[in-house]
Amino acid sequence: MTLHLDGEPVVVTAGAGLFGEALDAQAVARVPVDWRPPLPGTAAALARILADPRRAAANATAVARLVSARPRLVGVRPAGEALGLAPGTFLHAGPPITWERASGPLRGALTGAMLLEGLAADAGDAERRLAAGEARLEPCHHHRTVGPMAGVVSTSMWMFEVRDAEHGGTSFCSLNEGLGKVLRYGAYGEEVLTRLRWMGDVLGPVLAAALRLGGPVDLRAIMAQALQMGDELHNRNRAATSLFIRELAPAIVEAAPERAAEVLRFMHGNDHFFLNPVMAACKAGADAARDVPGSTMVVAMARNGTDFGIQVSGLGDRWFTGPAGVPDGLYLGAYGPQDANPDIGDSTITETAGLGGFAMAAAPAIVRFVGGDVSDATAATRSMYEITLAEHPAYQIPGLGFRGTPVGIDVTLVARTGLLPVVNTGIAGRVAGTGQVGAGLVSPPAAAFTAALDALAEAAAPC
């Protein structure tokens, strides 16, 4: 397209990089426009949704609730007490799934949970019972809960309890086990069960006592500070974990002097320890934004190792799914893509709330973990402003002039731009018990967003 400004022709170029470069070489004045075609087959649904008179106000309400949440860590309690979780019921990451369709890491984690709860004699017995339907499987998200990787929660596991001081909601996440062979990656050997029992006998009670003594912890303040110290709060939580330990250490020592050293040593040895409170904090904010009629904002993204699912504020608890992809990234040791399980975990609640992949510009060191270079991390964050409704007022990125992180994924913007959310993630081994094999980036399936778009179109109010 050619425009005339003050009599001089100016060429507008969209998506034609080589053509634009050719014009530059000829010293032709041009205006580059970053334009992409919408996702295929979405035009009719988009037109109907964009004409919905409720949409703009509904999205403003939803994203305002999300960014105004004030999550505080108020307690640590066993899942049976906190969630009313009965023996034989297990929560898992992602949308609903059955044992038959479960991936290797999820099957391994469920097997380990059966053994932990004394519901099976050995791994073979656990698998037979699970295959026979003797256990009840439900998504963490259906219980105000999120879980990393396989996300399996059983009765005796202790949970972080987070309360939103602004909107009053409560959310939960399990305690972080550390690195290596761990249940969340599908491992269930004796060392895994021994660690989980210690967490139930020592770690959970000590943290609970420390919180009773020291009072609630302002998670939003820690998260905001950690972003300015090089974390993105999904795959890099080194600064946040350090700040968290600093906050809790005096109360831990006072509440349990005989156990303080081993508890603090365990927390100090795991840079990802703070990820789980972050996830619960993000869940609290996203839940505050639910159930706004007419809103097209995403309030959950989650994966179970087989399916990637999203939930949308204006569509209640419905899941919209597509096949989970295998992350593209860096692998540990001799592992490679052939060892990787498709994407898994509820930790994409961080991206849902404007962190993780959406905040990679704040964490240049993350590229050493997920691949690429610093410019890629910055570009990833910049691109997410195109599909979000707001910039977070508290979570700011120093390298972008303290611009707020992009927050509030809008299904219509995803469809209109063709851009999918950027997710950074750990990579689980596809064989149960393998553990983590790498880390990288992954894109959600477009099918989840187009399915949600169609449902939004059906629910749209008439003009």
Image (cartoon, helix red, strand yellow):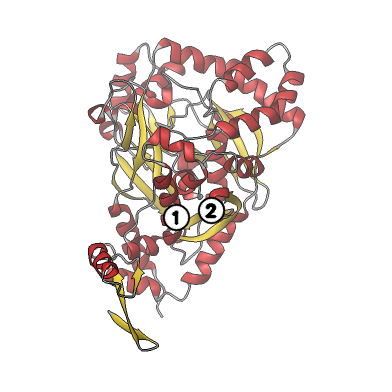
Q: Residue 400 carries which label?
A: 2
> Mark number for residue 64?
none
Q: Is residue 206 left or right of residue 156?
A: right
Residue at the image point whose x is 58% and y is 49% from the top: 398
Asked if 302 appears above or below 457 in the picture, the reply is above
Circle 2: element type: helix
Q: Position of residue 215 (x, y in %)?
A: 74, 34
Measuring from the top left, give residue 304's x and y in whole percent.
35, 37
Of circles 1 and 2, the one toward us is 2
* Image point (38%, 71%), residue name: 49
Residue 193, how many percent across, how many down? 46, 14
Quarter of the figure with the N terminus: bottom left
Res. 144 in view: yes
Q: Name the residue located 33 percent from the left edge and 35 percent from the top edge.
A: 329
- Which is nearer the eye, 324 or 168? 324
Residue type of the residue flagged with mark 2: Leu
Left or right for 133, reference 159: left
Report crowding for label 1: few under 14, some 14 to 19, many 20 or more residues within 10 A (C-alpha): some
Foreground: 171 or 266? 266
Residue hosting label 1: 382
Measured from the top left, where is residue 183 in percent x and y?
Answer: 42, 22
Label 1 SS: helix
Q: What residue type is labelled 1?
A: Arg
